[in-house]
Image (spheres, rainbow, N blue to C red):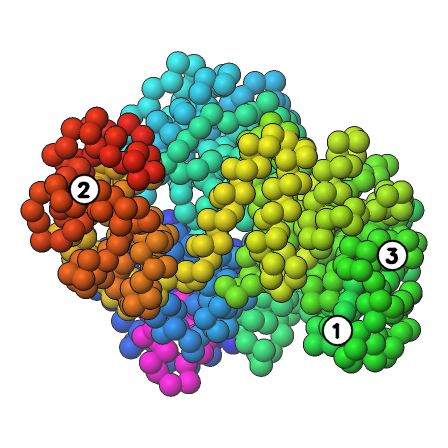
Amino acid sequence: MKIAFIDHSYHQKTRSTDFFVRELLAGHEVDRFWDNSWETRRPFDVGPLMGRGYDLFIVWQLPDAAQRLLKHAGTNVLFVPMWDGADTYTDADWRSLAGARILSFCHTLHRTVTHLGLNSLYAQYWPDPAPFTPVEDFSSLRGFFWQRLPEIGWKEIGRLVDGRGFERFHIHKAADPGEMIEGVAFEGTLTQSDWFENPAELQAVLARHNVYFAPRAREGIGFSFIEAMCRGMVVVAVDQPTMNEYITDGVDGLLWTLGDPKPLDFSNAPRLGREARQAAIAGRKRWLAQQAAVQRFVLGEAAAPVAGAAVSEIARPLEAPAGRKVSVAVVTFNAEATIEATLASIRAQTWPGVEIVVVDGASTDGTRAILERHRAEIATLVSEPDDGPYFAMNKAARLATGDYVIFINAGDLFASETALADAMESIPDGEMPDFVIGHHLYRGEQGDILRRAADFDLTFARLKEGTIDTRWLAGVPCHQATLTRRALLADEGYDTRWRIVADHALLYREREKGARVHHSGALIAIYSAGGLSWTRRSETYEEWKTLLAEHGPAEAAERLHAEMRGYLEREALGRPSFQGVRSRNFVTKWQRSLRMRRDMILVQRTGLFFPNWYAEQNPEAKTIRGGPLRHYVRHGVFEYRDPSPFFDTRYYLLTHADARKSDMLPLLFYARHGAARGDATTPWFGALWTEIGSTAPPGPTPLARMIAWFAKTSAEVMLATCRQVGLDLGNAEWMGRG
């Protein structure tokens, strides 16, 4: 096969795409072309490549080149986006690539693309950890920081470290093209470098350190921090894709929030480093297992197989190792549309001797007939009425004979053929933990969402002390990604007074008794929307509140409950229709810049964007070039962030259907249409206007008059008036001052 590989010209220096050519395109004729349009502002000319007999065009990170190629009928195009460039693509941008196959190395990208109906394959690349010498000396902390971009500088690193006993730091001052880097001061031993022409020199420096601070807020693949994990270094990275898809905070690395750096706990550095290397070893195994499938996708199903890429069938052992037998329990009721796929997912598991136990709640559709067709592969099948899913799960646990039980309900799937093997093989020899947890994919209307299970000991500690929030809750493993020791279930099982959250209740109850939870780091299951926790959200949050209050401070449970109710409201908004205004149509960087400046001017003209207030609410806005206004136009508005205390974006969209359906930014829609008709922009607008309307200064709209009243009224009078209508404005230092 003759392949044209069009790549970003900066990768000539970094060689960050060489792995792709070496591992996936071996045996084929590959011509590489380097696109420098990011420097010249002239689009890459694909014309000279046509008519040269190429069977496949691979375009890496350059959507305009891919789009130009697709205009030629019959062109075979593979597009490989990177998160550090594609985070601004709109639905229109993606749809212009509908004729291409898309290989996504970032799950967040994959989710977006598949939701739009495009042909995407997700793969997570890991290099071979074997050549990297593991870090073993953690007698002191020694940090390495590659300073590449202004958004993460020495100031942020200093806050993360907070004087936590680092013996020395090495600063690699190699900025990305066109970027400025600041000077560095450090009280301990400080060494510095710039670009290493010889990679061996970089390896030698890294070998003397054990903590690696990832240099960027967004990564495509992120070779530098992945290789640090291969060494067994503690990687400190921003909690953003793609990094948070490789790193589980507190398990095999540390994550922090961009714009809000806080001191990190390095006390478990040796464990984090060991787990990082183990994650890399397991990740490399998964990459090799899926390499042939990725290769077929890249080359096209009709392509001739690559020499050496064929995967032969390997005979599976019939029995699992002692203490490692797994029973997969399936609970069903009227599931004829989904049960077939669930059973196929279980049969495909490579872990030996898997036992299937099915408890059917006396289905009245075709479920029982399907189960009977597969009777030979089901060890135990029961079909009778029950009192709900957890009653059925307890029954299944009593019927199982495995050492561990995992519940994969009808409609749920294992994430891969090796999911159970990845989880079980991660258990240290001679140990038998009570729970083996892992990650799962949540499959909803917005596509697959990767849910990463947190370190459970840390999760439970935060529950006890009350430092829980919505992010904490997302890290609690679901039962589809949890293997539970059968003996533990046989003793008490699930507490059936909980109709929805009994799986969480079991974890908390047993952990209080001293149960050991092992984190496998494996992606175990695909959990489909439609279960009780999805369809009965309000009841779910009520049960969570009660459950959490039993195991931690009641006030923390109340706070989380309020946050989750707000989440329900946000879900009602769905995907913002005004996302379309961010369309760039793959024009030049210069044209994109002009459009951004236009939007910034229009927002500023509304008089409803308060930069100081916005920066206080969104600290990360202080870290980007262009400041709060640019952050709002580029990111904030698409995340429903508010431009000022006088414009509640979510409230306005929920209460004004025409604004919700419009492709205009909500703030600009209000300025053009809503202001003239007196739209309320906050929940408290009407009550406050009733109170102050007669005394407010003149102005073109009620809102303009209200803002003028805030600016001219003394703080004492203003706060007293606001308290009368139940509005708490804190210290009100922001009043009337953008």
Find out whether residue 123 is within the magenta segment.
Answer: no
User: In screen coordinates, is 725 left or right of 479?
Assistant: left
Residue neighbourhood size for the residue with mark 3, other residues' Cα within 10 Å, grouped as few (<14), some (14–19), many (≥20) = many
Q: Position of residue 160 (x, y in %)?
A: 44, 27
User: In screen coordinates, is 400 left or right of 33?
Assistant: right
The image quadrant that residue 658 belongs to is bottom left
**Residue at position x 78%, y 80% in the image:** 366
Under circle 2, the secondary element is helix
Q: Position of residue 215 (x, y in %)?
A: 41, 38
* Magenta-highlighted residues: 56-77
Confirm or deny contact between disc 3 and disc 1 (CB under 8 A): no
Say which label, 2 or 1, has the lower sequence index: 1
- Between disc 2 and disc 1, the foreground one is 2
Q: CA distance from mark 3 to mark 1?
A: 18 Å
Which mark is on residue 334?
Answer: 1
Q: Position of residue 430 (x, y in %)?
A: 86, 36
Find out whether residue 59 is within the magenta segment.
Answer: yes
Q: Position of residue 697 (x, y in %)?
A: 9, 43
Residue topped by disc 3? 395
Residue farthest to the bottom? 73
Nearest the eye: 405 or 345: 405
Nearest the eye: 380 or 142: 380
Q: CA distance from mark 3 to mark 2?
A: 64 Å
Type of residue at label 2? Ile
**Residue at position x 61%, y 42% in the image:** 545
Type of residue at label 1? Asn
Which mark is on residue 692?
Answer: 2
The image quadrant that residue 655 belongs to is bottom left
The image quadrant that residue 710 belongs to is top left
